[in-house]
Amino acid sequence: MRAKIDERTRIVQRCIFEFPEGQIRSIASGHPVATSPDSGAIAAYHVGDDDVALSQRFEGRHLVHTFTTSDGGSRRNHFTLSNDGRLLTMRATVTSPRLSVSVSYTLTYERMEGP
């Protein structure tokens, strides 16, 4: 179990978001591309050997990802872009029936220019 949590909460070096018509596409280094309707409707996503239900939507100015596993675990990423567009803050919350409490942490990413 610990290895799975470590794998799923690894800090990624780069995040890219794209918004083609009616969809949200999230690209995080080391992970499969996550694409789903921008309405928050559930889409299939695969992490390692696990099938995961993915939902992505905007809540006001915040982008929210929710990943839910068949065993009842979930991870919710709540992204907020700074007013000047330079910093992206992600607050992640991980829950699982195997954890006695949920785990939350915050990461801040700085915008990079170029490819």
Image (spheres, rainbow, N blue to C red):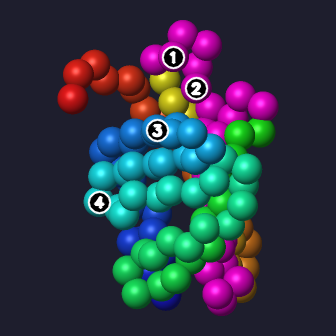
Q: Is residue 63 magenta?
A: yes
Residue at coordinates 69% horizontally, 35% vertically from top-left? 62
Mark nearer the N terminus (4 vs 3): 3
CA–CA distance in space, label 1 to label 3: 15 Å
In this figure, which residue is indicated by the disc labeled 4? 30
Mark nearer the N terminus (1 vs 3): 3
In this figure, which residue is indicated by the disc labeled 1? 85
Residue at coordinates 52% horizontally, 38% vertically from top-left? 19
Quarter that holds the C terminus: top left
Highlighted range, magenta:
60-86
Q: Is residue 49 magenta?
A: no
- Residue depth check, mark 3 versus mark 2: number of the one nearer the observer: 3
Mark nearer the N terminus (1 vs 4): 4
Find residue 41 and report its horizontal and vertical position in percent.
72, 61
Q: Is residue 1 above or below residue 88?
A: below
Q: Is residue 81 left or right of residue 62?
A: left
**In terms of depth relative to the viewer, which is nearer, 103 or 78?**
78
